Image (cartoon, helix red, strand yellow):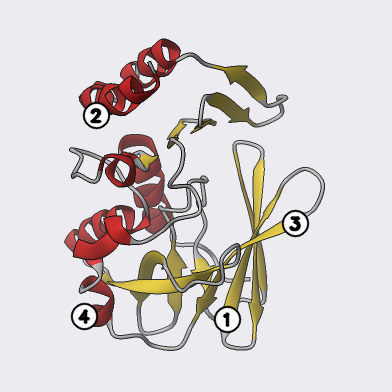
């Protein structure tokens, strides 16, 4: 088994903790000051990894739910291996997917992910406490980053499977917070998943405890339902 690069995973973890996944940009059709969906997440991660001396680029993967090649993540290359890092799935995908590794399982905050190499693809799955659910399919064939980057300005125009309700997710040490619509779930290792229905006021208060800079945009979106 190939050993994961600890610096890569530490950088990825820091992003999960400080740069939340959310779809406020899509819901409001505007820039936000921090965080975002896969495109924003991949660009931030690439920037941080290049500063650390890694050869990193943006890569596209297929979303298994829709079949669209619309998920963005980061490819990291060195003389021995190519690997992929994903900060923008809305789940704590804290794994390093190696292009030469047959299978790899990662667990974060009680959530398991399985990476399996199949031909020229890496299949990413999440265990939902009943079965493995397919998330993304990453081609290990080289791609043209410039073509992918050119799509960035149009990212708010692209239909997404979650563009009809709020998604807001982040990692807090060993806890993963995931807001879907008005439901908060908190995942933590060796504990039952905490599930709470929140009012708009509750959502703002909860997010304000971690990312107060996003409260203005969050409140702007939630005002639609008052």
CA–CA distance in space, label 1 to label 3: 17 Å
Mark closest to the chain's N terminus, 2 or 3: 3
Residue 211 position in % (x across, y down): 29, 25
Horizontal relation, residue 82 to residue 115: left or right: left
CA–CA distance in space, label 1 to label 2: 38 Å
Mark 2 is surrounded, within 10 Å at the Cα level, by few (under 14), some (14 to 19) or many (20 or more) other residues, namely some
Q: Which mark is residue 217?
A: 2
Horizontal relation, residue 196 to residue 153: left or right: right
Mark closest to the chain's N terminus, 4 or 1: 1
Q: Which mark is residue 146?
A: 4
Q: Nearer the viewer, mark 2 or mark 3?
A: 2
Task: Provide the secondary structure element on which disc 4 rests.
Answer: helix
Task: Provide the secondary structure element on which disc 3 rests.
Answer: strand
Please say if 108 is above or below 103: above
Mark closest to the chain's N terminus, 1 or 3: 1
Q: Quadrant of residue 70?
A: bottom left
Q: Which mark is residue 121?
A: 1
CA–CA distance in space, label 2 to label 3: 35 Å
Residue positioned 18% across, 44% down in the render: 31
In the rendered image, which residue does mark 3 sit on?
A: 132
Mark closest to the chain's N terminus, 1 or 2: 1
- Answer whether residue 45 is visible to the viewer in this image: no
Residue 118 position in % (x across, y down): 66, 82
Horizontal relation, residue 35 to residue 205: left or right: left
């Amino acid at each position: 088994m190939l050993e994961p690069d600890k610096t890569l995973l530490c950088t990825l973890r820091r992003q999960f903790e400080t740069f939340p996944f959310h779809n406020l940009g899509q819901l409001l059709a505007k820039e936000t000051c921090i965080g975002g969906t896969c495109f924003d997440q991949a660009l931030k991660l690439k920037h941080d990894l290049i500063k650390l001396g890694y050869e990193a680029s943006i890569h596209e993967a297929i979303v298994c739910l829709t079949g669209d090649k619309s998920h963005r993540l980061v490819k990291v290359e060195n003389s021995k291996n190519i690997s992929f890092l994903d900060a923008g799935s809305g789940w704590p995908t804290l794994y390093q997917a190696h292009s030469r590794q047959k299978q790899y399982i990662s667990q974060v905050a009680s959530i398991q992910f399985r990476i399996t190499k199949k031909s020229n693809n890496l299949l990413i799955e999440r265990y939902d406490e009943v079965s493995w659910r397919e998330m993304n399919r990453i081609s290990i064939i080289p791609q043209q980053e410039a073509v992918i980057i050119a799509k960035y300005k149009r990212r708010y125009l692209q239909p997404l499977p979650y563009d009809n309700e709020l998604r807001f997710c982040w990692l807090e040490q060993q806890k993963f917070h995931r807001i879907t619509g008005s439901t908060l779930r908190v995942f933590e290792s060796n504990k039952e998943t905490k599930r709470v229905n929140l009012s708009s006021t509750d959502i703002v208060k909860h997010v304000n405890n971690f990312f107060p800079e996003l409260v203005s945009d969050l409140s702007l979106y939630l005002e639609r339902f008052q």
